Amino acid sequence: MNPKLNLKIFIFLMIFFHGIYILKQSYGIGFSVTPSLPYYAFLIDKKDLTFSKKDLIVFKYPGENVYNYKTDESFVKIVSCVPGEILKTKNYEYFCNDEYIGKALLKDGQGKSLNPFIFNGIIPKNNYFVTGTHQKSWDSKYWGFVSKDRIIATAKGLI
């Protein structure tokens, strides 16, 4: 075989696999196993941590080990209230700047009692209130804020 052709193939393969490695370090595909969001697949962007209210973020679960969710398990939720905004809870209903976010349940599907997170005031710096779109979404309504240091990526819904 031609040594120059072998070298070109080798260089091409090195560049190709290096590109795959770089993409894997920066991006990923995530899947949801619950109906808590309108998407089941997500493009995860690990490089860009800039986001706004109503964007999807990926973060390490900040709550206790409930429902087999472990601390540091990755979650995807919608940013529903950001630092400096006013979060109010009334009758287990949540409002950000008087805009309805959702309602917490007092019992889960098996009848187990739930302890919703109650907060009335200004969202503290570097903290976010995140929710899903499904009424049974396990989110900030139950475990509170997600701190900025737990956010690991942004996400875009695919399907």
Image: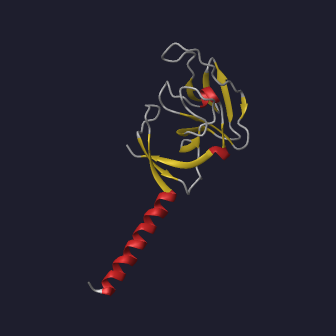
Toward the front, the furthest residue is 1
Residue 38 location, quadrant: top left
Q: Nearer the viewer, residue 123 or 151?
A: 151
Q: Residue at x 61, y 20 (%)?
A: 92
In the image, what residue occupies the spot 73% across and 43% down? 125
Residue 105 at what x, y percent from top left?
A: 55, 19
Position of the C terminus, as image quadrant, is top left
- State left or right for residue 36 relative to residue 82: left
Q: Is residue 9 left or right of residue 50?
A: left
Quadrant in which residue 9 is drawn: bottom left
Residue 107 horizontal side relative to residue 83, left or right: left
Q: Please tell me whether residue 113 is drawn above or below residue 12 in the rendered image.
A: above
Q: Is residue 133 above or below residue 159?
A: above
Quadrant showing the N terminus: bottom left
Residue 79 image position (x, y, % from top left)? 58, 40
**Going 37% across and 77% down the picture, which residue do you hit?**
10
Residue 19 location in percent, x, y? 44, 67
